[in-house]
Image (cartoon, rainbow, N blue to C red):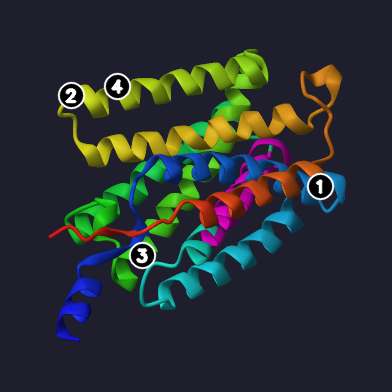
Amino acid sequence: MNQIAENKLSLSKVPELTLAFWVIKIAATTLGETAGDALSMSMNLGYLLSTAIFAAIFIAAVVVQIKARQFHPFIYWTTIVATTTVGTTLADFADRSLGIGYTGGSTLLFALLMLSLGIWYKTMGSINVKTVSSAKVEMFYWITIMFSQTLGTALGDWTADTAEMGYLGAAVIFGGLLAVVVALYFWTRVSRTFLFWAAFILTRPLGAVLGDFLDKPLDHGGLALSRYSASAALLAFMVACILMFRQRASQKAH
C-alpha cells in the first residue's frame, strides 16, 4: 500500500507528452474553434454571452480537475476543450466587438501569456508541466493554458486574414513552425520546457485556422461545413483517441 501511495505522489496531473497527446490537442483546438463559432454565430448568441457561458463551463471544469486526486483523461481533456472554446469567443470578442483588431488582440494576449508564465515561474520556481500536482500550480497551469488558447485564436485570425495567408496558408505556416519545434526536440538540447510551451501555443492557431477552414463560407476560403456536424465529428474523434490510446500521468518533476 505504501508503494502504491508513493507511486501516486510521484505522478503529476497532466498526461505524458506522447504523439497521442499532440494529436488529441490539435483536435481539441479545432473543436474549440468550431464549437465556439457554433454558439456565437450559428446560434446568434454573440461573442460576449458565448464567452460568459464558456467561461462558466471552464471554471467548473477547472474545479473538477483540481479536486481530482490523480490524472483522469476525460476530465483533463474536457478542461482543455473548455479553454479552447472560451479562448475562441473571448478572442473574437476582443478582436471584433471591442475593435482592438487581430494585431492588437494578439499583442495584448501575448503580453498576458508572458505575464502569466512570469508570475508562475517567480512564485513556484518552475513552469515545467511535470510539476503540476498541487492546486496552486494547477491554477497557474490552467490560467496560462487559457491565455495561450485565446492568443492562438487571435494569432490564427491575424495570419489568415490580416496577413492574407488564408486558412490553408496559415495552417502550412503553423504546421511548419511545429515541425521546427519537433526538430529542435530531437536534434538539439534546447530546454524541453520551452519547447513544450512553444508547441502548445502553436497547436492552437493551427487548430483555429483548420476549424475556420472547415466551417467558414466558400467565398471566405472555407468549406462551409456545418459547425454542428464538424464539432460532433471532432468530439467523436477525440473520444476515440482517448479510448484507443491509453494515456498515463507524467512523472512528477523533482
Give the residue pinned by disc 1: 228
Quadrant (top left/top right/bottom left/bottom right) for the C terminus: bottom left
Q: Nearer the viewer, residue 83 or 113?
A: 83
Q: Main secondary structure of the magenta part?
A: helix
What span is colored magenta in the figure? 78-98
Instruction: Give how far apart the Cα atoms at labels 1 and 2 are.
Output: 42 Å
Membership of 80 in magenta stretch: yes
Q: Amino acid at mark 1?
A: Tyr
**Dot 1: few (<14), some (14–19), or many (≥20) neighbours within 10 Å?**
some
Instruction: Give how far apart the Cα atoms at labels 3 and 2 are.
Output: 29 Å
Q: Is residue 224 left or right of residue 17?
A: right
Q: Nearer the viewer, residue 197 or 40?
A: 197
Q: Amino acid at mark 2?
A: Thr
In the image, is residue 222 above or below residue 193?
Answer: above
Eye-nearest disc, 3 or 1? 1
Instruction: Give how far apart the Cα atoms at labels 3 and 1 are.
Output: 31 Å
Mark 4 or mark 3, earlier in chain: 3
* Residue under the image location 21 percent in, 80 percent down: 5
Q: Amino acid at mark 4?
A: Ala
Q: Secondary structure at mark 1?
A: helix
Mark 2 or mark 4, earlier in chain: 4
Q: Is residue 218 left or right of residue 69?
A: right
In the image, is residue 181 above or below residue 110?
Answer: above
In this view, which residue lies farthest toward the left? 254
Residue 188, which numbered label? 2
Give the residue pinned by disc 3: 138
Give the residue pinned by disc 4: 183
